[in-house]
Image: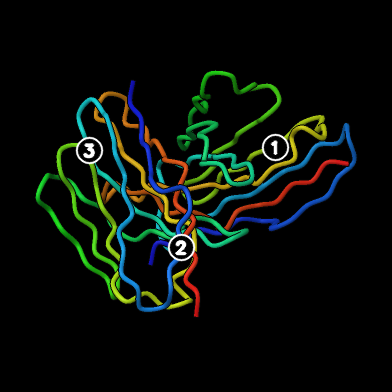
Amino acid sequence: EDQVTQSPEALRLQEGESSSLNCSYTVSGLRGLFWYRQDPGKGPEFLFTLYSAGEEKEKERLKATLTKKESFLHITAPKPEDSATYLCAVRAARDDKIIFGKGTRLHILP
Amino acid sequence: GAVVSQHPSRVICKSGTSVKIECRSLDFQATTMFWYRQFPKQSLMLMATSNEGSKATYEQGVEKDKFLINHASLTLSTLTVTSAHPEDSSFYICSADRGLEETQYFGPGTRLLVL
C-alpha cells in the first residue's frame, strides 16, 4: 500500500535554529515527491517537486532532498514567518494519485 | 502563474440544504481538477477526480450522490454538497493539474459549517 509518513508531527524552534523535517514514503513507482506549505485556514502552497534519488532543490531558507525511501526538508536559520504546516506528498505511477502525509506543524519562536 | 481560486471562502448553512462550491483555474486550462476534504490537524483526503467533459471519479467511501461534481469547462469545476448535515462540516480544497508538470496547484479552500 502506498503511504507517506511525516515526522515529527510538530516542531518548535528558536529563530535562527536550523533543523530538518522528514518524509518517509513507500510507493509503487514514484512519479514525483512534493512539498507544500499550508498556513491555517488556507490551501497548500506548492514549494518543490523532486523526481529521483539524489535530487535537491532550494528556495530561500528551504532545501529539499530525496532518497529512495525518504525526503528531507531542511530549514536554515528560520524566521517566525516560516511557521506553518509543511506537507509532503507522493504521486504513484500505478494510479497517478497524489497521497499526502499528515504534515509537520512548524513553529518558529522569535 | 498557476493560480486557482475558490468561491465562497466560507459558508454557513442549515442542515438539509445544498451548498455549491466553485473552483476556477485563473491563468491556465486544467483538464483535471481534484477535490479534497481536510479535518483539523489532519491530512488532505482526496474525494474525487474531475475531468472536463466526463464523469468524476470518486474515491472509495465518498458518496457520489451526496457530493455532486461538475467539470463543465477547462477552467471551472463545482462541488455541490447535497442535503448537508453537520458531519459534512469541513474544509474543502480543490486543486488543478496544469498538465505541464507532475504537481497540482491548490485553491485557498472553502470552510463549510452546517448547523
Question: Compared with residue A79, is residue B95 higher up or lower down, i.e. above or below?
Answer: above
Q: Quadrant of residue A37?
A: bottom left
Q: Is residue B114 left or right of residue B52?
A: right
Q: Amino acid at mark 3?
A: Arg
Q: Residues within 10 Å of mark 3 (few under 14, many from 20)?
A: many
At x 56% / y 44%, what residue is drawn? Answer: B77
Foreground pick, B108 / A70: A70
- Mark number, residue B3: 2
Q: Distance of mark 1 from mark 3, alpha carbons?
A: 31 Å
Disc on res. A31? 3
B34 left or right of A36 in image: right
Identified by mark 1, the residue type is: Thr
Q: Residues within 10 Å of mark 2 (few under 14, many from 20)?
A: some
Instruction: Identify the disc placed on residue B80.
Output: 1
Callout 1 crowding tier (Cα within 10 Å): few <14, some 14–19, many ≥20:
some
Q: Are marks 1 and 3 on the same chain?
A: no
